[in-house]
Amino acid sequence: TKEMSDPDRLQYHKMHSKPIMDDLKQWMEKQFDERKVEPNSSLGKAFNYMLRHWQPLTRFLEIPGCPLDNNIVERCLKSAIMHRKNSLFYKTDLGAHVGDIFMSIIQTCRLAGINAFDYLTEILKNSRKVFKAPDLWMPWNYQNAMAESR
């Protein structure tokens, strides 16, 4: 399904995934109805969570291009959590502030598929141009600004 367009993938999921998801929901509800699973047990809590959040968890059956997972968000949060842990060792508030800025820039570069070191190097080399038009020097379009300034 990786090679499919978003609308084709949606149709695929409607045809193949929706019946499975519907059966899963029905089965979980049946487990509660037949008292095979206690609502307060670990499994019952997991079922209740899934049933309470059914619509958001099944958005991939309704929205073209909707991802099946939230791995991108998880990776971003992991970086922020690691930064928070490491920031305990900053000696000053200013140092922590600068570290926060760099963490944000590096994460933005990562999401844009840009090498953060190359980006920061070019920003420093072209600092006057960046100061005059910072919107042209964002990680996702700084290479265009470099090409135009040559």
Image (cartoon, helix red, strand yellow):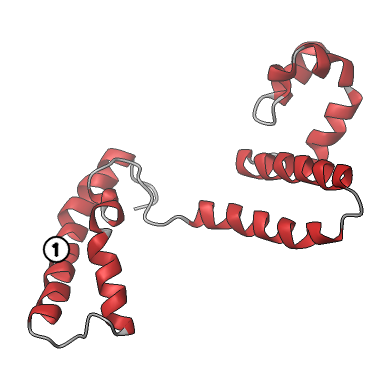
Q: Nearer the viewer, residue 41 or 126?
A: 41
Q: Is residue 147 above or below residue 41?
A: above
Q: Nearer the viewer, residue 127 or 4?
A: 127
Q: Residue at x 72, y 57 (%)?
A: 84
Q: Residue at x 64, y 41 (%)?
A: 113
The picture places residue 72, in percent across and down from the top left corner, at: 52, 52
How dense is the environment of label 1, judged by Cα within 10 Å: few (below 14), some, or many (20 and up)? few
The residue singled out by tag 1 in the image is: 22
Quadrant the C terminus occupies:
top right
Number of numbered tags placed on the structure image: 1
Horizontal side of 72 relative to 88 (left or right) equals left
Which of the 4 quarters of the picture holds residue 79?
A: bottom right
Amino acid found under the numbered disc labelled 1 = Asp
Horizontal side of 27 relative to 70 (left or right) equals left
Which of the 4 quarters of the picture holds residue 143?
A: top right
Horizontal side of 112 relative to 137 (left or right) equals left
Q: Residue at x 34, y 53 (%)?
A: 1
Q: Residue at x 30, y 56 (%)?
A: 57
Q: Is residue 78 above or below residue 100?
A: below
The picture places residue 23, in percent across and down from the top left corner, at: 13, 69
The picture places residue 116, in percent across and down from the top left corner, at: 76, 41
SS class of the residue under badge 1? Answer: helix
Q: Nearer the viewer, residue 9 or 54?
A: 54
The picture places residue 104, in percent across and down from the top left corner, at: 70, 42
